Image (cartoon, grey):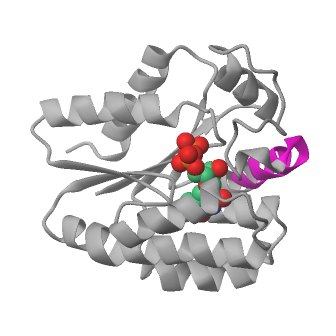
């Protein structure tokens, strides 16, 4: 089974993934947790270019780099893991590409679709949890434990995070659009709720969709 988590940066995906992994492991499920971009030696190098680079990267270059990282992870790790019955939990997958490169950077959605199918070998998640939060709220969370001034232009942020408020508003719009088009796969959760409430909602949805 492939479970993916989506949401804008700061939505709290990592916390929820950790809680879910602990739960599933306790149920004796064999779980593999991965994140995009990254997860293989080559994909981690691509991640560095994408997030740490101080250079400009063109929208198409960025799209192809995310897709190259995904192709590596899918072929080297995800396909083999699914084949032996593991539960794969993936922090971001192709919905991030649609939201960030499509709605955020403005790349044509049909073009995106064909690149996504090439990079994923047609693999689609069984269920996708989307943690919904306003960009400004997400930024506040990120800086809540520091004295760093609150701004999308801050040097402490990675290359993607420095893209600005309007970009993140478009990304969120993209996610909301994706959910309305894929209701059977997406579960949208209010990320402002307490962590344990969100965790129990995730477990309840999993039980409802996959009763066995
Ligand atoms: P990461 O540090 O993993 O962020 P987060 O903890 O928010 O998941 O950085 C991944 C960044 O890359 C994040 O800003 C989202 C972006 N991204 C894309 O723009 N397109 C993609 O296809 C993927 C997978 C990620």
Is 121 left, or right, of 46 in this rendering?
A: left
Query: What residue sits 15% from the left and 61% below the top?
Result: 85
Q: Does the magenta stretch include residue 147?
A: no
- Report the front residue among 18 and 197: 18
Please state, as top left, top right, bottom left or bottom right, where the C terminus lies in the image.
top left
- Report the front residue among 72 and 171: 72
Up the image or down, 67 lies above or below 10; here it is: below
Up the image or down, 169 lies above or below 56; here it is: above
Magenta span: 164-175
Is 113 left, or right, of 162 in this rendering?
A: left
Residue 210: x %, y % from top left: 30, 46
Q: Is residue 168 magenta?
A: yes
Q: As drawn, which residue projects farthest toward the left?
A: 28
Up the image or down, 110 lies above or below 90; here it is: below
Query: What residue sits 50% from the left and 60% below the top?
Result: 37
- Report the front residue among 121 and 38: 38
Residue 86: x %, y % from top left: 18, 57
Count of numbered labels shown in the rendering: 0
Residue 75: x %, y % from top left: 32, 78
Is 198 left, or right, of 176 in this rendering?
A: left
Residue 165 seen from this side: yes
Please state, as top left, top right, bottom left or bottom right, where the N terminus lies in the image.
bottom left
Up the image or down, 210 lies above or below 184; here it is: above
Residue 6: x %, y % from top left: 56, 47
Query: What residue sits 44% from the left and 77% below the top?
Result: 71
Residue 6 seen from this side: no
Query: What residue sits 62% from the left and 55% below the top?
Result: 51
Q: As drawn, which residue projects farthest toward the front?
A: 54
- Report the front residue among 143 and 206: 143
Q: As drawn, which residue projects farthest toward the right?
A: 166
SS assignment for the magenta stretch, majority: helix
């Amino acid at each position: 089974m492939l479970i993916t988590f989506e949401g804008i940066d700061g939505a709290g995906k990592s916390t929820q993934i950790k809680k879910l992994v602990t739960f599933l492991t306790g149920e004796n499920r064999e779980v593999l947790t991965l994140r995009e971009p990254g997860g293989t030696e080559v994909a981690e190098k691509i991640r560095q270019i994408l997030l740490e680079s101080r250079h400009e990267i063109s929208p198409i270059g960025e799209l192809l780099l995310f897709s190259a990282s995904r192709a590596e992870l899918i072929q080297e790790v995800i396909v083999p893991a699914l084949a032996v019955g593991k539960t794969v939990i993936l922090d971001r997958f192709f919905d991030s590409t649609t939201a960030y490169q499509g709605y955020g950077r403005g790349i044509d959605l049909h073009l995106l679709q064909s690149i996504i199918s090439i990079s994923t070998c047609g693999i689609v998640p069984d269920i996708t949890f989307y943690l919904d939060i306003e960009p400004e709220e997400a930024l506040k969370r990120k800086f809540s434990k520091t004295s760093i001034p609150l701004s999308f232009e801050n040097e402490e942020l990675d290359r993607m995070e420095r893209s600005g408020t309007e970009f993140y508003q478009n990304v969120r719009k993209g996610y909301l659009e994706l959910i309305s088009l894929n209701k059977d796969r997406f579960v949208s959760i209010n990320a402002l709720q307490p962590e344990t409430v969100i965790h129990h909602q995730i477990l309840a949805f999993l039980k409802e969709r996959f009763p066995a």
